[in-house]
Amino acid sequence: MTQPTITALDTALDADQADTVLSAAWDAFDVAGRLADALAFDEGSDEIQATLVGIKCTEGRRLLPLPENDRPRETPTPCSGRAGLEPYGALLRHASGALRRLASVPEYADDAEQLSLVADHAAAAAALLMTVRQDGDGAS
């Protein structure tokens, strides 16, 4: 995944339209989940931690509506070291914050509990992702 794609998702997570935010959060979970799958088979990665990231992403994505954009994001390639995972961790943390913001909007009060749960999954996936590799470990 390229930096412009991450930037586009970041921008969408800050949108005023709930559908745009939910779609971007779904895409963030999808991308991070596919990255986790790749990392589980990558030398120098903790496959258990990578699997846990994938589970959290699947759980979060399952609770969101399917995006209407019909354009799958590219699968990220495993990056070198822990620093290479940071953009994806930041994206998941941003998704968590965007979902919490949406949960606090009065018109989404009925969905606030579910949105908060999805935000928790995003935050947990972000934290777990950063434990998949130690500094300097992993192939590019």
Image (spheres, rainbow, N blue to C red):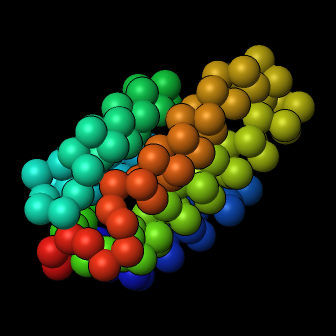
Q: In this picture, is 3 found above or below 112? A: below
The answer to which image quadrant residue 31 occupies is bottom left
Residue 45 at x, y = what percent? Answer: 23, 57
Q: Is residue 119 left or right of residue 72?
A: right
Residue in view at x 29 percent, y 46 percent: 50
Given residues 131 and 123, the one toward you in this image is 131
Residue in view at x 45 percent, y 59 percent: 130
Residue 120 at x, y = what percent? Answer: 62, 35
Residue 30 at x, y = what percent? Answer: 34, 47
Q: Is residue 92 left or right of residue 117?
A: left
Quadrant of the drawing holding the N terminus: bottom left
Tell how many labels: 0
Given residues 63 and 128, the one toward you in this image is 128
Residue at the limit of the structure toward the right, as seen here = 106
Quadrant of the drawing holding the C terminus: bottom left
The answer to which image quadrant residue 108 occupies is top right
The answer to which image quadrant residue 123 occupies is top right
Given residues 85 and 98, the one toward you in this image is 85
Residue 114 at x, y = what percent? Answer: 64, 22
Residue in view at x 16 percent, y 54 percent: 38
Q: In this picture, is 89 found above or below 51? A: below
Residue in view at x 25 percent, y 77 percent: 80
Q: Is residue 81 left or right of residue 112?
A: left
Given residues 138 and 118, the one toward you in this image is 138
Q: In this picture, is 98 found above or below 56? A: below
Q: In this picture, is 24 found above or below 106? A: below
* Residue 63 appears in the rendering: yes
* Residue 22 appears in the rendering: no
